[in-house]
Image (tube, rainbow, N blue to C red):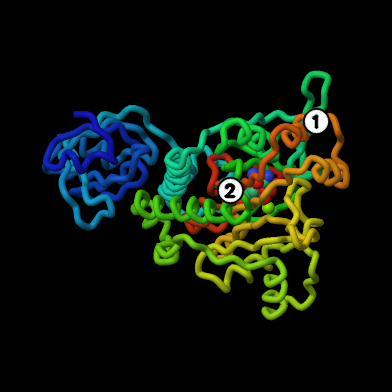
């Protein structure tokens, strides 16, 4: 019977065959312990000299790291392994012998590992992080589908910019100038006017020369947009969505979180509602915490966000930032036009901003005024302005950065490990 490591619990006491690679190995004169991986998980295979043919024991003793094989044996319970099972190996059919696999069980430097990302992904830790990433994606589709949202795919090649023009990747679109999408938001606004509640999930690009543990050049964003939803309701949707993905990861990635050594007690109480603090109060809080230089009107950097987050044990919304430091499309506060109806959601434990969102301007004249103030040119935004011309309604939306969320839930300190092939400043290989 052919099966996978993820399914061995269904085969206790039975003999099965698994297609696997050798992750690691220990052996003595009489017994070999093979750490097997098959993509679905990791499992120990035990080869006892007296129980197998001599040729098989010799193969087990000499098999090299990352060699591939079909391995057959009986599945038995093993309370010491996190999986709960191991294989009593009966026979091994070698498929391919790997010679001198570069990533050995010893420590390697980050640059070396990054150069070998195509192989590094096979490690137990990277495997666990990719599974957490996958669970967040799965839970995202579940949450939005169950709540009546339609998945919409905005274009990647665009003629307009959502988040300011300085960080755009330029490319040629035949004779025209085009950009890689920084955010699907503007198109999602059009989609919300057609379908009510929509969400997107796709790659976005920022030509940011930032070299921090939170910045990627190419990252994936989940962008919901909702017609007839004002700012306060949007925050409720955000806290429910984030709670849902955290609880889904806790529920469905137990082994992975254990592999990663994640302190899950810090995630268990991540349940809606989340605290809210205004930008004004955040400035006061920072002053109290010793950031004496910060002035009203300045944007927050990573140290500020971390300091604010430390005052809370859940993610915290920082609301109503000054209009001048935010994007052109944000709806002004009705009583204080110098601030906008927006919020950034800051994750606990120093993981920083995971969501940026706002209510959008729905008045045509105000929108025209704002985008001109921001130096954006007319033609590329004609379609966007028309959304305010025909049945404009209050609407809000937000963008959750997938990699920062993976970093937070996995407890890894750099986003380079949260995406299969990270695009970083000075890194396009592999
Ligand atoms: O705050 P941002 O720039 O917001 C937008 O793009 C809005 N148009 C979204 C919307 O309202 N539909 O980006 C949203 C999130 C951030 O909170 C962060 O999690 C992530 O995207 N993000 C990055 N992640 C990794 N590397 C980068 N360079 C990122 N820039 C933003
Ligand atoms: Mg932001």
Q: Is residue 52 above or below residue 178?
A: below
Tell me which corner region of the image, top left, top right, bottom left or bottom right, holds residue 66. Answer: top left
Image spot of residue 41 (x, y percent): 33, 43
Residue drawn at x 73%, y 58% is 333
Disc 1 target residue? 382
Q: Specify whether 374 is left or right of 101.
A: right
Q: Is residue 117 above or below residue 177?
A: below
Residue drawn at x 76%, y 49% is 327
- First in residue order: circle 2 vs circle 1: 1
Image spot of residue 145 (x, y percent): 45, 38
Residue sitting nearer the eye, 87 or 312: 312
Tell me which corner region of the image, top left, top right, bottom left or bottom right, holds residue 353. Answer: bottom right
Mark 2 falls on what kind of element? Answer: strand
Number of marks in the rendered image: 2
Q: Specify whether 76 is left or right of 263.
A: left
Residue sitting nearer the eye, 384 or 118: 384
Q: Specify whether 52 is left or right of 408.
A: left
Q: Please give the label number shown on residue 142.
A: none
Mark 2 or 1, closer to the camera: 1
Disc 2 target residue? 400
Q: Specify whether 424 is left or right of 404.
A: right
Q: Is residue 290 above or below residue 10?
A: below
Disc 2 and disc 1: Cα gap in Å? 27 Å
- Quarter of the image where the N terminus is located: top left
Answer yes or no: disc 2 within 8 Å of ligand 1.
Answer: yes
Mark 1 falls on what kind of element? Answer: helix
The crowd level at tag 2 (other Cα within 10 Å; few <14, some 14-19, many 20+) is: many
Residue drawn at x 41%, y 51% is 249
Residue sitting nearer the eye, 346 or 265: 346
């Amino acid at each position: 019977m052919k099966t996978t490591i993820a399914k061995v619990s269904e085969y206790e006491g039975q003999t099965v065959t698994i297609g696997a690679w050798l992750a690691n190995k220990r052996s003595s004169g009489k017994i070999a312990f093979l750490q097997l991986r098959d993509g679905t998980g990791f499992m120990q295979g035990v080869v006892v000299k007296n129980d197998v043919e001599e040729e098989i024991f010799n193969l087990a003793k000499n098999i090299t790291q990352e060699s591939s094989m079909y391995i057959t044996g009986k599945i038995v319970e093993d309370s010491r392994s996190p999986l709960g099972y191991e294989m009593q190996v009966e026979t091994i059919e070698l498929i391919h012998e790997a010679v001198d696999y570069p990533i050995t069980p010893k420590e390697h430097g980050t640059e070396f590992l990054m150069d070998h990302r195509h192989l590094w992904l096979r490690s137990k830790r990277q495997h666990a992080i990719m599974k957490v990433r996958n669970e967040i994606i799965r839970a995202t589709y579940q949450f939005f589908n169950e709540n009546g949202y339609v998945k919409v795919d905005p274009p990647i090649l665009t003629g307009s910019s959502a988040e300011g023009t300085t960080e755009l990747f330029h490319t040629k679109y035949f004779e025209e100038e085009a950009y890689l999408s920084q955010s699907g938001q503007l198109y999602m606004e059009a989609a919300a006017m057609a379908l009510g509640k929509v969400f997107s999930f796709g790659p976005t690009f920022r030509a940011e020369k930032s070299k921090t543990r939170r910045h990627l050049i190419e990252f994936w964003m989940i962008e919901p947009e909702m017609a007839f939803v004002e700012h306060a309701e949007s925050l409720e949707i955000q806290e429910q969505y984030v709670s849902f993905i955290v609880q889904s990861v806790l529920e469905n990635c137990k082994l992975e979180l254990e592999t990663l050594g994640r302190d899950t007690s810090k995630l268990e109480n991540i349940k809606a509602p989340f605290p809210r603090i205004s930008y004004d109060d955040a400035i006061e809080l920072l002053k109290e915490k010793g950031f004496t230089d910060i002035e009203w009107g300045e944007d927050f950097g990573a140290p500020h966000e971390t300091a604010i987050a430390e005052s809370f044990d859940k993610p915290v919304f920082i609301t109503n930032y000054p209009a001048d430091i935010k994007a052109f499309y944000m709806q002004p506060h009705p009583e204080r036009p110098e601030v906008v109806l927006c919020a950034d959601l800051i994750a606990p434990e120093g993981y920083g901003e995971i969501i940026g969102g706002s209510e959008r301007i729905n008045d045509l004249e105000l929108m025209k005024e704002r985008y001109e103030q921001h130096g954006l040119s007319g033609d590329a935004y004609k379609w966007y302005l028309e959304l305010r011309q025909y049945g404009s309604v209050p609407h809000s939306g937000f963008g959750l950065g997938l990699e920062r969320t993976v970093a937070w839930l996995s407890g890894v300190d750099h986003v380079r490990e949260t995406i299969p092939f990270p695009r970083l400043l000075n890194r396009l290989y592999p």
